[in-house]
Image (spheres, rainbow, N blue to C red):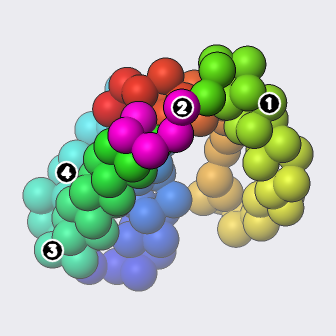
Amino acid sequence: MSQSICDFVVLQLSAMLDSELDTDTFHLVQVHLGQCEACCALLKELEMLDGQLAEAWSADLHVTRQQAADAADAVLLALPPLPCRGAYAAKRVHHKTRWNRLISGIS
């Protein structure tokens, strides 16, 4: 596989897990995942980690929604700006979606 397409797909995997990709990008990523074992393995690892985080969050932490939202906001504010990688720069579409899903216990 071409390294540039793999780089692009890797940048899209988190958005794909959060259902944030547009139809064309989703189709492109799906086709690539069907052909690239390395990217497919990375997606499976991300899915596993996502599930473990959601499970650990709901099992171990008993916080109010407001406390969780405040924590998510603090983390988002502490993140460094996304590096630009040319035409395939990662886009933060609905950057709070992943945190909202995590704090609400939705997997």
Circle 3 residue: 37
By secondary structure, the bulk of the magenta-drawn segment is best described as: helix
Label 1 belongs to which residue?
Answer: 70
- Magenta segment includes 61: yes
Quadrant of image for the C terminus: top left
Q: CA distance from mark 1 to mark 3?
A: 38 Å
- Residue in the picture at 15% in, 74% down: 37
Image marks 1 and 4: residues in contact by CB distance under 8 Å: no
- Which callout, 4 or 3, points at the residue further toward the start of the chain? 4
Q: Between disc 1 and disc 2, whose residue precedes?
A: 2
Q: Is residue 20 located in the magenta-colored stretch of the structure?
A: no
Q: State the residue position of label 4.
A: 31
Which residues fall within the magenta stretch? 58-62
Q: Counting residues from the N terminus, which is met first, the one under dot 1 or under dot 3?
A: 3
Identity of the residue drawn at 22% across and 47% down: 30
* Between marks 4 and 3 in the image, the one whose residue lies nearer the viewer: 3
Query: Please, what is the three-letter code of the amino acid marked with disc 2?
Result: His
Above or below residue 60? Residue 93 is above
